[in-house]
Amino acid sequence: MTARILNLHAILSILFCRKRDKQFWFNGVLSAFKNWKHRIRQQSIVIPRVRLAWMIRMTQILKNKAAQSPTFSIQLPERYIVGKLLLIVLALVAILLLVLPLVVLLMRGVQTRGWEGLPGAGIPDAIYVSLLTSTTAIVATMTFGTPLAYLLARWRIPLKNIWIVFVQLPIVLPPAVAGLALLVTLGRRGLLGPILGEFGVSLPFTTAAVVIAQIFVAAPFYIRAALVGFQEIDHEIEDAARVDGASGWVLFWFITLPMAQRGLAAGLILSWARALGEFGATLVFAGSRPGSTQTMPSLVYNIMERDIDAAIWTGLLLVGVALIAMLLSQWLVRGQQP
């Protein structure tokens, strides 16, 4: 209650003091309240009565001044105005960098008739390859990534933090470096290439290479979300289930997974969107052969020079898919929060 009274006094003080005294009293009230709030945050003793009396006395003086000069124009200190303007300018710059290119792309797509050239530009084949490979990659990611995330979240593993860093490292790797790493590992002259060659398996520049590249760059998004989801589960609920006789696979399938399902689903959607939009690693490791390894991002790159309008509409399709994925992910994450 005291805090509300003092805040009210401070507001009245600023609004009803004379022009020439407004700046002085504004700074005084502001400093007093900063000091008072700091003491409250530190959980110190109650504010001394002397200081409380001084603050009340100061507001009384300001009220008396208000009676002498009731009209004036409010002018905040210059440093606060400059700070707010700087904050707005920086926010506008961020919006221009992040949102404006997408808006311009949409406007350019609406103005042109690029959709007329989509069938002849190889769009159906690229869509088929993209959906086939990204879906396969996500199934594999969910199959192998869920146990890995659970082990990293629950088990005491030596050097766990280092393993977590390495598992998430492909998120920040340059796409060309990711493709090169896959090529020197699984290529014909790579580490495992000769071994696979003995069984008649050659991965580079095949549809399987597209799937592997998508798994490499997209799986960390799912593993990271699953890791957080498993860590946020209330252990008391699992302990109660163990008391009732649940253990092993029963506990994992019917207690742990349902409690983490929203986080897993959000990570799965983001991972699928990342796999669908993968370009750099796929181009280096799998190439861009129409009908086998050419995905929608690589198609945009290939047709950009000869048919910019068709490339824009292909890009808009990918933007729409990414937008839907982000909205679904945000909805799932918000639903998970209490």
Image: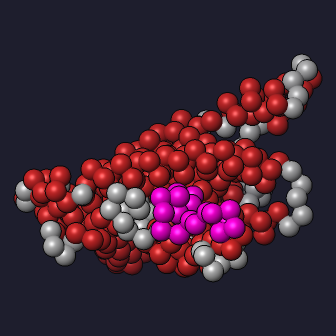
Residue in front for this viewpoint, 246 or 181 = 181
Magenta part mainly helix, strand or loop? helix
Residue in front for this viewpoint, 135 or 330 = 135
* Residue 206 belongs to the span the image colors magenta: yes
Q: Could you tell me which quadrant the C terminus lies in? A: top right
Rendered residue at 67%/37% (across/down): 260
Residue 279 position in % (x across, y down): 42, 67
Residue in front for this viewpoint, 152 or 299 = 299
Residue 77 position in % (x across, y down): 37, 74
Left or right: 117, with 164 as reference point: left
Residue 13 position in % (x across, y down): 41, 59
Up-down relation of residue 280 to residue 313 (above or below): below
Number of numbered discs visible in the structure rendering: 0
Splitting the image into 4 quarters, where does residue 265 fall?
A: top right
Left or right: 31, with 311 as reference point: right
Rendered residue at 78%/69% (across/down): 162
Residue 94 position in % (x across, y down): 35, 70
Asked if one can make out residue 208 in the rendered structure from this viewpoint, the answer is yes
Q: Give the range drawn in magenta.
A: 196-218
Splitting the image into 4 quarters, where does residue 185 fall?
A: bottom right
Splitting the image into 4 quarters, where does residue 76 fall?
A: bottom left
Left or right: 73, with 108 as reference point: right
Asked if one can make out residue 96 in the rendered structure from this viewpoint, the answer is no
* Residue 244 belongs to the span the image colors magenta: no
Q: Which residue lies furthest to the top in this view?
A: 244
Rendered residue at 74%/30% (across/down): 253
- Judging from the image, the colouring scheme is secondary structure
Up-down relation of residue 31 to residue 68 (above or below): below
Q: Could you tell me which quadrant the N terminus lies in? A: top right
